[in-house]
Amino acid sequence: MNPTLFVLLALAAVLAGCASPTTEITPVGQTRVAISSDDPFIEIHTRPIYELTLTLPPPNVPGYVWEIAAADPRYLKQTSTVAPLPGGSGGATVTFVTLRTGRTRLRFFAIPRTPARVADPGGKCDIVVLIE
């Protein structure tokens, strides 16, 4: 057998073995939290392998939308996009699955719908998530 062909076949076999299927996580419970515009800095207690659904208030500036500024994928797996609430209230919802025990932080900023440089976001939410 040609040595080059042997090396290519061996490399193909190794690369084929590296592909692993994505594991789907099925939550065993739910935690739903509505964030108030009066207190956007909160602490949430939940459990591992729970679905965590957050409802964000309308941003302080009309025409702005919520965007995730920080989320640690070691603790939280995002399972939905940040989506506007039905009815045009300006609020939004987003869902995560908690992965393991620990403490993590979620940060959201309200930014303009159209790309623009902004010195000050139109709202902030800073959420500490305790997974116990």
Image (tube, rainbow, N blue to C red):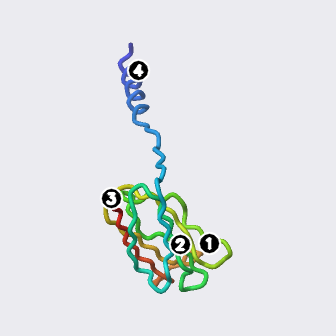
Residue 10 placed where, x, y %?
Answer: 37, 25
Badge 2 local density, few (<14 within 10 Å), some, or many (20+)? Answer: some
- Do labels 2 and 1 touch, CB within 8 Å? yes
| Residue 55 numbered tag | 2
- Do labels 3 and 4 touch, CB within 8 Å? no
- Mark found first going from the N terminus, 3 or 1: 1
Disc 4 element? helix
Badge 1 local density, few (<14 within 10 Å), some, or many (20+)? Answer: some
Q: Distance between the residues labelled 1 and 4?
A: 57 Å
- Mark found first going from the N terminus, 3 or 4: 4
Q: Distance between the residues labelled 3 and 2?
A: 22 Å
Residue 102 placed where, x, y %?
Answer: 31, 62
Q: For the residue marked with disc 1, what is the amino acid?
A: Leu
Q: Mark 1 points at which residue?
A: 85
Q: Distance between the residues labelled 2 and 1?
A: 8 Å
Q: Nearer the viewer, mark 3 or mark 4?
A: 3
Query: Which residue is at 39% across, 58% downward?
Result: 73
Q: Distance between the residues labelled 3 and 1?
A: 30 Å
Q: Mark 3 points at which residue?
A: 101
Q: For the residue marked with disc 3, what is the amino acid?
A: Thr
